[in-house]
């Protein structure tokens, strides 16, 4: 299945590379990931102060060379998070409203410090919107996110 071993491809991840395509086009940027089956490269570049993501299909790559050993180990450097200014009181209110909503819908939820937990299946982080849900189970994640989306008076959660 693999033309190049996945461990060999991994050496390019988070490195600044230069890609030459079969059409002769030169692309350069930081490799975010490489699909080991198709060998498609997800390349992060900066254009006009904006972070852009390009996908270079594996069949179009003629050569892939590390042009700098600079390593971008922090994903936040590539994708800076958007900060939301919400008061602590508003966050606590959202937490209590969400906990109440989940209980009304017979979802067993527990408080664990700042987190809301659904046993070991799902965590909800501040500011307690559907985008702050974390779970390894896609089905549970999707259903809880849908339920949060139907919660009355959620505002911009």
Image (cartoon, grey):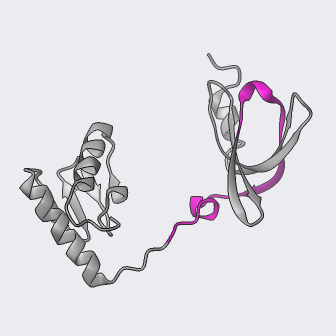
Q: Which residues are magenta?
A: 55-82
Please state if 100 lies on the left or on the right of 44 as rendered.
left
Please state if 94 lies on the left or on the right of 110 as rendered.
right
On the image, the x and y values in percent for residue 131 come to 37, 57
Q: At 22% across and 67% down in the image, what residue appears?
A: 153
Q: Quadrant of the C terminus?
A: bottom left
Q: Report whether residue 109 is seen.
A: no
Name the quadrant containing residue 125. Answer: bottom left
- Seen as rendered, the residue at the extreme right is 24
Image: 66 above or below 112: above
Residue 53 lies in the magenta-colored region: no
Q: Quadrant of the N terminus?
A: top right
Name the quadrant containing residue 137. Answer: top left
On the image, the x and y values in percent for residue 115 come to 25, 65
Please state if 122 lies on the left or on the right of 21 as rendered.
left
Residue 77 lies in the magenta-colored region: yes
Q: At 17% across and 51% down in the image, what residue appears?
A: 119
Please state if 11 lies on the left or on the right of 88 as rendered.
right
């Amino acid at each position: 299945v693999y033309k190049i071993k996945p461990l060999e491809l991994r050496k390019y991840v988070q490195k600044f590379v230069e890609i030459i395509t079969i059409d002769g086009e030169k692309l350069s940027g930081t490799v975010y990931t490489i699909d080991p089956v198709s060998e498609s490269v997800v390349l992060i570049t900066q254009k006009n102060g904006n972070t852009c993501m390009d996908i270079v299909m594996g069949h179009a790559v003629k050569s892939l060379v590390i042009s700098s050993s600079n390593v971008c180990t922090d994903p936040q450097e590539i994708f800076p998070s958007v900060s939301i200014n919400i008061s602590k009181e508003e966050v606590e209110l959202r937490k209590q409203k969400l906990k109440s909503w989940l209980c009304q819908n017979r979802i067993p939820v527990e408080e664990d410090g700042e987190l809301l937990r659904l046993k070991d299946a799902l965590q909800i982080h501040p500011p307690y919107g559907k985008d702050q849900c974390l779970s390894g189970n896609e089905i549970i994640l999707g259903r809880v996110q849908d339920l949060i989306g139907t919660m009355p008076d959620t505002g911009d959660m």
